[in-house]
Image (cartoon, grey):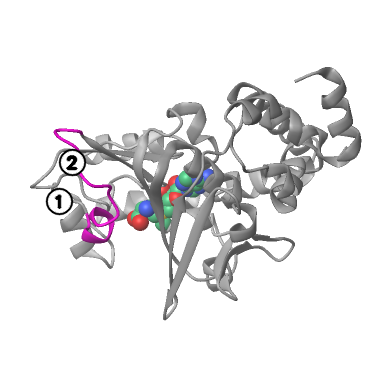
Amino acid sequence: MSVRIWEALCVAQNENCVLMDILDIATINSRKTSMNLTENRVFADYFNFLVSSGGQQLSRAISLWRSGVESEGDFWSRWFETKGLEWPEDYAIRIRPAPLAPWLAELLPKQHGSEVAKILDVGAGPITKAGTFLPDRPIEVVACDPLARVYDKIIERCGVKVPLRTVFSFAEDLSARFEESSFDLVCCTNALDHSIEPAWGILEMLIVVKKGGFVFLSHRRNEAEFENYAGLHQWNLDEADGDFIVWTKERTINISELTGGFADIQCSVSGDGLTTRIRKTNNIPIDSNSYHRKLRAALLNALIDDSGR
Ligand SMILES: C[S@@+](CC[C@H](N)C(=O)[O-])C[C@H]1O[C@@H](n2cnc3c(N)ncnc32)[C@H](O)[C@@H]1O
């Protein structure tokens, strides 16, 4: 793309310049996609928030998150020591290899030959609840969690053998660790409401899942309100007029609007539970190099704000 067109675009959509840089319009054009993400204001505003204006809010979120880590580690320590606290059946199920949960298996694409279906469990805790095998087709499950190293220590101290070790990753940096469009299915249970910035985590899930694949989320509605914002419970997830929203007392992000143009979202509410199925309909046309550079800068910025507190 010529510099003049680039400049014209930047002038025309002044506040979107950062976004333009991230998305790399030239790449979008060369892929001949009809989607123009810059028309999605919510997406544009959200990226600008993350990489520029978001510094202080992000830093506050990181600070709150760090202060909740110890209680999460303590919870899982006691869970192992007591073989499941009030949930001994849960402990007994997780400690043995189990088949992939049927509600996840039904979201897998049709099998082609001997192809191995790849599933990512985000915020899996020390032992994934998703299951690790299917009797009738080959699958590979990867479980990740930012507290993976804490869990490794607990597991070793308790001398437990687990079916699958959890590896380190935040929901917010999945695409820095896993290939884009490399998973057939991504799932996340009871963890996004514990994260730093769930909207960012969902975008990352959409980057690493294949086009046509699903992101499956299962959470209690408005968990932070329920838990009175204790520990890592800082975010609420809910449905509003058919849209999927994440919110705190200060901010609400409409995920259905945020992902308009590259995902279809279906929410279903049952009692205080919220199940969300997100199908990736288009690749998010980001230039990953630029995207990671910008977000790294935003994170370091947030770190400085945090240390100056
Ligand atoms: C209540 S546990 C749920 C674990 C498991 N998914 C389950 O259903 O048992 C919440 C998990 O979310 C993880 N978590 C916290 N922040 C996260 C983030 N930014 N990205 C992904 N997971 C996160 C925590 O470390 C913790 O293991």
Q: Residue furthest right?
A: 11
Residue 269 occupies quadrant:
bottom left
Which residue appears at 59% of the width and 52% of the height?
A: 259
Dot 2 amino acid type: Pro
Q: In the rendered image of this protein, does residue 258 appear above or below residue 291? A: below
Residue 284 occupies quadrant:
top right
Dominant SS of magenta comes to: loop
Q: Nearer the viewer, residue 250 or 88?
A: 250
Residue on which disc 1 sits: 98
Q: Is residue 294 visible?
A: no
Callouts 2 and 1 close, C-beta under 8 Å: yes
Q: Residues within 10 Å of mark 1 (few under 14, many from 20)?
A: some
Relative to 302, is 176 on the left or the right? Answer: left
Q: In the rendered image of this protein, does residue 201 appear above or below residue 190? A: above
Q: In the rendered image of this protein, does residue 234 appear above or below residue 10? A: below
Q: Nearer the viewer, residue 55 or 199?
A: 199
Q: Position of residue 270 (x, y in %)?
A: 40, 78
Residue on which disc 2 sits: 163
Relative to 28, is 195 on the left or the right? Answer: left
Part of the protein shown in magenta: 101-115
Which residue appears at 59% of the width and 32% of the height?
A: 32
Which residue appears at 55% of the width and 40% of the height?
A: 172
Image quarter (top left, top right, bottom left or bottom right) of the C terminus: top right
- In the image, residue 289 lies in the stretch drawn in magenta: no
Among the two numbered marks 2 and 1 on one chain, the one whose residue lies closer to the N terminus: 1
Dot 1 amino acid type: Ala
Relative to 224, is 134 on the left or the right? Answer: left
Query: How many numbered circles does the render carry?
Result: 2
